[in-house]
Image (cartoon, rainbow, N blue to C red):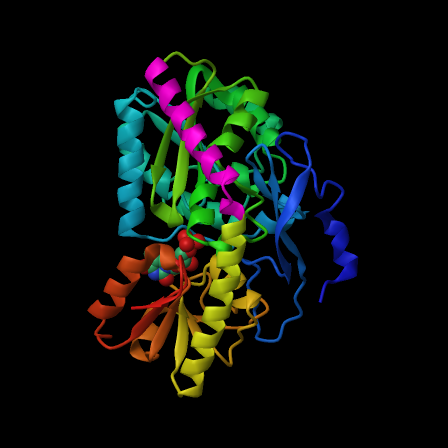
Amino acid sequence: MINVELLSAIHDSAVGRCRLCGSTAKTLLDLGSMPPANWLMSTHIQAIREFPLVLEKCDCGNFQLGYCLDAEDLYTHYNYATPNSPSLSEHYSRLIRHLEQNGYLTPDSNVVEIGSNVGRFLAALRPRVKSVLGIDPARNIAEIANRNGIRTLVEFFDRRVARDVARVEGTADLVVARHCLAHNRDPYEILDGIIELLAPDGALLIENAYAMSTLQQNEFDQIYHEHMFYFTLHAVRTMLERRGLALVDVMFSDIHGGSIACVAKRSMSNAAITSRIAAELWRERELLDYGLAQRFVDGTASIQAQLKSTIGDLRDRGCVIYAYGATAKGATLMNSIGLTSRDISYCADSTPIKQGKFIPKCGIEIVSEEWAFANPPDVFLLTAWNYKNELIAKARAAGLERVRFIVPVPDVTIV
Ligand code: TMP
């Protein structure tokens, strides 16, 4: 049930308006009312606050949430700590190599990361650059980063913070904004700060889940209140152009179900890259013009129906099911089909700050991987499907030879 008092916390005045280009945005998928996915509960029956979860589409190529919560409500105390993952470390190495090979990063670079979380990306960068500095609004998360030796300021990044940092530390040769611009209602506020902070020839790295992968692979569980935008290349270009920045490079990867990493600078010069970007924009336009968004809506309904019946059948046969990965995605996935702790007994997760808490609404308790492996289920629902190979390997290595895994996307399969 939506708590009417708290509806004032959401910005519904701009529903139906593209927050990147200002045109009309139409509802594409309405997932009803949901609690913010990372508002983990401390007890099974805690009262929860729910807000509309609606994906909108604009003809400019932007996808966004219709109703946005305040960043303060979502990020002041945060329950997401970047996990220690071999595939993530490999991804960082690939990104850094690309930045170095293309001259966006040198041993003399001063790097600032916005939304740096516990500092894993900066820790990978640190041996290769002159200095690293993190900025993150979540005090509990920044404390972990600082304890691990990654200097991190506790701030919501904006122009004021940017000016202060530039004055004290100097301008930044590389500003990193991974999973950050799309996690705020108004990315221009952050972008304006970045422009203040960026050295004249500096580079900005923007990385986020890639909307085209989200749509093509039916990843409807990527929709939750923190994800206020779903970036296409078109969307990133619109955003940058409106602030006079040039999109100078783009990289795609499989991480997090498909991600896009873009590099922007104050000016553009490379003709080969310009034509590659043009080709990617053309590819996106073709897919969007030929019904991709509607196929995603249909694919979502089909996964929801299949998953519900698969889990119902397994439960009727007496199988014990746990979720694996207390992801925000998992909260959307399970709540969107009404699963509860009667269907899914526990959720295994490696993050200490999540363990002992409960996924909001569905009320599933989060336990350590060690506990889950010592008290194994018959089946895991892979709610962290983006780490599929490593989670399955981890369970097998722990001796769980017979346990099965339900992979929910791009369609429901059992491994
Ligand atoms: P994410 O998909 O939003 O990054 O979240 C992944 C979640 O999965 C996070 O809560 C940590 C958890 N996880 C494990 O429990 N074990 C692992 O080995 C990895 C890589 C992640």
Residue 172: say if magenta. no
Q: In the image, what residue occupies the spot 41% across and 22% down? A: 203
Drawn side of residue 249 relative to residue 63, left or right: left
268 relative to 259, above or below: above
* Residue 158 in sight here: yes
Which quarter of the figure is the N terminus placed in?
Answer: bottom right
Point out the residue furthest to the right here.
5
Residue 316 x, y percent position in the rendering? 44, 87
Point out the residue furthest to the front here.
290
Drawn side of residue 71 relative to residue 149, left or right: right
Residue 275: say if magenta. yes
Q: Main secondary structure of the magenta part?
A: helix
Residue 45 x, y percent position in the rendering? 61, 75
Q: Nearer the viewer, residue 399 or 367?
A: 399
Which residue range is magenta in the image?
Answer: 271-293
Q: Nearer the viewer, residue 294 or 47?
A: 294
Q: In the image, what residue occupies the spot 39% across and 39% down? A: 150
